[in-house]
Amino acid sequence: MPWRRETYKKIKQIPSDEHVFPGTALCAGCGGLEALRLAAKVLGDDVVYVNAAGCFTMLTAYPFTPFKGSWLYTTMGSAPAGAQGVRDALDVLIAKGRLAKHENLKVVVLGGDGSTYDMALSSTSGALYRGLDFYYFCYDNEAYGNTGMQRSPSTPYGARTATSPCSLQHPAGTMQEKKDIFEIWRAHTPPYIATVAPRYPLDLEEKFARAAKFTGPKMFLALSACPTGWLYDPGETPEVAKLAVETGLWPLKEAINGSVTHTYIPKRKPVEEYLKLQGRFRHLFEPTVQKEAIAHIQGSVNAYWERVNLAERAG
Amino acid sequence: MNQTDQMMTGNLAAAWGARLAGADYIPAFPITPQTEIVEALAKWCESGAMAARFVTMDSEHSMMTAAGAAAATGARVFTATSSQGLLYAMEVLYSISGWRAPLVLVNVSRALAAPITLEPDHNDVLAARDSGFLQIHAETCQEVLDSILMAYRIAEDERVMLPVIVNLDGFYLSFTREPVILPAPEQVAQFLPPFRPAHLGFKASAPHALGVAVLGGTPYSYFRHQMHLAAMNALDVHRETAAAFERLFGRRYDVVEGYRLDDAEDVLVMTNAFASRGKVAVDVARAEGRRVGLLRLRMIRPWPADAIRDALRSRRAVAVLDQNLAPGQGGILFQEIAACLYDEALRPRALCSFIGGLGGKNLSEGEFRAIFDQTAAAGARGKGIGPILLYTEAEHREMTQLQMLATTQGDVNRET
């Protein structure tokens, strides 16, 4: 069954109001910021962003903040625990009449892949287990970005980073497979999980609108094309981000109470078209073409979509 | 005064402190020897005896994050931990004080791994001495409860706005029953005003960005200096708070406690529950004709330098009995006492360092006698000694036997 958007059908429907203002220290062409900007159009201003250490920590720098909403920087590993504290305190204060109901806020964790895929697993699992009513927004640029692009568990096979350089021993650079955080989250069966990509804004806005109907954890994984780390010109972010989806490398999907639907089925361009654009994959093409490594990447993508075909035809 | 009294453990007294203070939020995680605190609170929150939300978190690091975030949102927060749990949360302690979010954390002291053990010493709580949390160390179960009530009032005072640790010794106080008077809730209400922080809170009509990055040493130093000044304000605030407490409840607490100090020639300095043993040792020594006394430090942060100088000025000799050890340096409190006495014209002739009670190790009559003897001799010579690592012959024999059992010898015949 093809997935249909119910609320956001046309670009014109995307609200024009901005909730994340320009002038932050983030890199030009930051795909993560693009995704956040779009998400904020649905989330609005009545939010408190609870941040884990990462690129987005630089969004606020004393005395400036780009948000009309609130912000609390916690630690790299425990932003979901911070979200727990804020949510519980707001509930208690409202219940005891110390805070008026109209002062209530949505609680939104902002964490990069570095925090999300590793250090924050304990606090995230705890929040999912307790059914915390919050949003989790992970901007995934596939490495520890703020510290200069070191390998994180979200770095895909074949990408080189500062701590997984390509060598004779490790010709592909990163030899491990990208950790499947979507499945880790899904094992907790929260009400809502979705992957999003800013180059598919209607898909993104629709998912935030859908999530709003649920009480409990609403988990988002946003493709964050990263010119600084992936090594391409910032102006090319749209093309790179689009190809990530069109090659099938970044599936667009949602899981409602654990049940998965893919929201966009790409025709699947060859992965080479995507890999060729980025300096972090250059070693796969120069000085020689690493056919095995590229085939490995293509093979993983093919296998993934084979499983999707089988599952969604059966379901 | 409408107060009831009952026998209760230090842990239950701590739980009562949280309950009487009207805590709104209790993020929790179990760890020996504090677990009974959170069990009591869970029971009361579940039954409605306490109007607070109780949440078991996934770790102490998460627990303290939730605690600080909730306090930063405007809730009155209570939590408890020990030892490994306190250290697991250590980075968060610095965050909470940096957020200027008041809350009360009870630490039930327990010696740190490795080797892993359950019994008390003070390396855990003292590891937090630079975190920006204030610290009050209690000797009795009554003092635990009273210190929690006082801690909220001090923490939430506009001149302070810093979180507070109240420490009690594991096992020796946490599981020991003593008579405790429970203050009446109406009187606590007179003592402790509601928590209405002007500078904290997240609400739709008043967005707030807290804990933002600062770039450059200028803003960072400014905020850190402010924390120090606020912590120093706590000395005055404690004095006012203690006076108000005494008026309402009849019990008086100062930043230090003197025991038979008036005409003491030599003074023994201790903290926490083992100070009770120190007082007994002072009585024994006095009966033998020695003019000795004991100074119990109650407030560790802010450091009560004036009170310490006042108590130790003009003494012949002072023995600091640290129930903690900084390997490669010695006793932690010894160093801080030495520093605040340096410029004192009438400082004691000898400042002596003793290390005892690590991992709850017994402090015997013989060890106390040795402390007083050696301190007196040092006073006569005019030069301090130490750190002396206290250990008896009997304990050495016991340890040797344990080591023999633990070691296999290559040429021992083994029956199969």
Image (tube, rainbow, N blue to C red):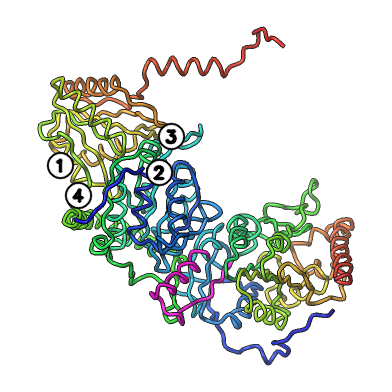
Callouts 4 and 2 close, C-beta under 8 Å = no
Q: Which residue is mark 2?
A: B108
Q: Which residues are magenta?
A: A84-110
On the same chain: label 4 and label 2?
yes
Instruction: Name the amino acid, label 4.
Output: Arg
Which numbered dot is residue B251? 4
Q: Chain of mark 1?
A: B
Vertical position of residue B373 compared to residue A144: above or below: above
Instruction: Name the amino acid, label 1.
Output: Asp
Q: Can residue A145 be found in the magenta stretch?
A: no
Q: Who comes first in sequence, dot 3 or dot 1?
A: 3
Q: Quadrant of the N terminus of chain B?
A: bottom left
Q: Can residue A102 be found in the magenta stretch?
A: yes
Which numbered dot is residue B37? none
Q: Quadrant of the C terminus of chain B?
A: top right
**Picture residue at 36% right of the left edge, 26% below the top:** B362
Q: Who comes first in sequence, dot 2 or dot 1?
A: 2
Q: Who comes first in sequence, dot 4 or dot 2?
A: 2
Per the model, the C-alpha gap separating discs 1 and 4 is 22 Å
Q: Nearer the viewer, residue A282 or A151?
A: A151
Vertical position of residue A71 compared to residue A16: above or below: above
Q: Chain of mark 2?
A: B
| Horizontal side, residue B84 vs residue A27: left or right | left
Q: Which residue is mark 1?
A: B310
Vertical position of residue B183 compared to residue B264: above or below: below
Q: Secondary structure at mark 2?
A: strand
